[in-house]
Amino acid sequence: MNLMMILEMAAGAMGDRVAFQNGDDRLTYQQLFDAAGALAASLDDGRTKHLAMLDVSTLALPIGVFGASWAGIPFAPLNYRLTDPELDALIAQLNPGCLVTDAARAARLGAKLVPTADGEYVAVGTREALLETTRAPGARLREAPWSMDPDETAILLFTSGTTGAPKAAVLRQKHLVSYVLGTVEFMSADEADASLNCVPPYHVAGMAAIASSVYSGRRVVQLANFSAETWLETARREAITHAFVVPTMLARIVDALAGQSDAGLPSLRALSYGGGKMPLSVIEKAMKLFPQTDFTNAYGLTETSSTIALLGPQDHRDAFASADEKARRRLVSVGQPLPTVEVKVCDAETGEALPPGEHGLIHVRGEQVSGEYRGRGSQLDAEGWFNTRDGGYLDEAGFLFLEGRMDDVIVRGGENMSPGEIEDVLLTHEGVIDACVVGVPDEQWGEAVAAVVVLSPNAAQSGAGKASVAELQQWVKDRLRSSRTPERIEFWTELPYTETGKLLRRKVREALRETG
Amino acid sequence: MAVLKAGTRFKSAVCASQIMVVKAPAREVTLTCGGVPVVELAAPDAAGGSIDPAHKQGTQMGKRYTNAADDIELLCTKPGEGGLAADGEALVVKGAKPLPSSD
């Protein structure tokens, strides 16, 4: 199994279709295949063991992903927002190798990266050079076929590290190919279909999108620097039919459309989102602004090769239209597991599987699940289950609800509580647009519940929907056990997020400790 | 007869079909296409031979084929006129409910 086989099938069946587009520059499937072969030939120097890419999305990205697979070496997309010392630590793990980046960075890094004591080094090249040499007419393709060994490493993804030092998740060919075969029908896209990709390459959704769009035959339009305005403008200009966004992106798109009754994007058939918690208010507004669009919520992790559960378009409509509170809540669930994976919720202490409605840790099993970190081996248990460390529960109908990372659980007087449960209640208050609940040190209870709340502009001033500390405490007290009432509530103008939409609880916790 | 391995690619000896093994049982299996045993992709093309009329259902690009026990799964990577079978049992297209695009 190899990602190259997926590209070979696409190039064979629809070689002249446009596979990737960046601005006005395009690569057809056949051109992508040839460029990957040319890159694989140049990587065949007996030395290079990794291909790292420190760059925004460009046409060099798919060439890098497939070229590395053909050459049989891991592809490692790096986060260009990291600081230099953080990047140095990652690059050191990719030695010996080759790093492709933009010209300015290449000049800076090229002078700095010196061979290690054993003479190994990371060579630095530019994106422009890669594009030029691999797309040159008559470029020589690698003669040796790619390996079909399912256990070869295809991609190394450094996990975002919202909770600690980044570590490299290992995604092998078998995980990614299983994901694609299990979720995408070959050549199912119409030739006119186009998907807008604004997720950075170092996010698993960005990697998964490359593999699945190639298999479906859908043209990918790359958008390197997201803003709501450029997203809307590109979507209209390119008649985008499919797109994936993280919750913060959708929130900004909805904001940019404030005052309008319709987004004016009739071509957009499907909008999927994931990578963080979607506030109910944002998704409800989006569904009104995009009445013709099918919404899908995808839940997945780096370690599971992306999506493992989906809340599909019909689920959205059913929940949206329902008068029943329970059914309506499904709009903030992540839907049901893919047919190709199994999900169970286990007790955090005993590890035993729990019945519907009971809260515990989400475990997942399936062929796309890697659960492996470089240098630490597989984290799967003897039966193949991966503990996501995400807390949550399944409802009676099998819908999965997330309640945040296990590492974020607040332990107050021996009682475990998940911040997500309290945040959900705060978010139902009409004056609250965002909320983050964390544990802060407390002499009496070990930890106390603290909340940081972002008020809507109306509520922040006064008048209707005005929310005071006392009122919000009462709001939670009326709906949850009294131990869940935040002892401390602060009002901020915004919460800290990673650029891919993950709430940085660590930063909230640190800030509260300093001011506490 | 051979024990199949996930990832191995085969081609038909009597038509254009090519397949990859996605899922394989631990037991030995005889895989045929067009009624004739398949050969490894890298093997030289066999001369002569023709499709057994009883195995003419064809293969479709990108479709996955499975047996009743669901312990064999093959992916068609190039279509042809012969039909796939494992130990004489005709393999059928694995029906998959289409999923909404999630990335």
Image (cartoon, rainbow, N blue to C red):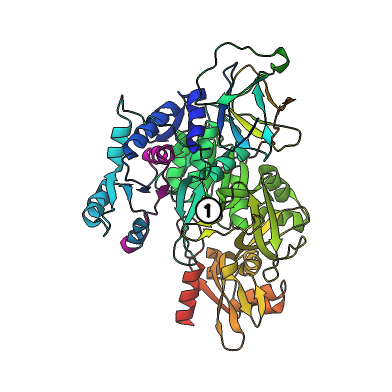
As drawn, is A195 to the left or to the right of A351?
left
Neighbour class for label 1 at 10 Å: few (<14), some, many (≥20)?
many
Q: Position of residue A87 (x, y in %)?
A: 35, 59
Q: Which image quarter: residue A233? A: top left
Q: Which image quarter: residue A371? A: bottom right
Say which residue appears at 46% left-offset and 47% top-offset: A155
- Residue B96 showing in the rendered view: yes
**Towards the viewer: A514 or A323:** A514
**Towards the viewer: A112 or A205:** A112
Q: Is residue A386 above or below residue A483?
A: above
Say which residue appears at 50% left-offset and 67% top-offset: A163
Q: Which image quarter: residue A37? A: top left
**Towards the viewer: B23 or A355:** B23
Chain that bears disc 1: A
Whether the magenta-drawn stretch holds residue B18 is answered as: no
Q: Which residues are magenta?
A: A58-85
Q: How many marks?
A: 1
As drawn, is A397 to the left or to the right of A188?
right
Say which residue appears at 34% left-offset and 34% top-offset: A41
Type of amino acid at the residue the image marks with label 1? Thr
As drawn, is B89 to the left or to the right of A111?
right
Query: Which type of secondary structure does the marked residue at label 1 adopt?
Result: helix
Q: Which residue is mark 1?
A: A302
Q: Position of residue B53 (x, y in %)?
A: 71, 12
Q: Is residue A413 above or below residue A230?
A: below
- Residue A293 showing in the rendered view: no
Q: Is residue B53 above or below residue A221?
A: above
Residue farthest front in this picture: B1
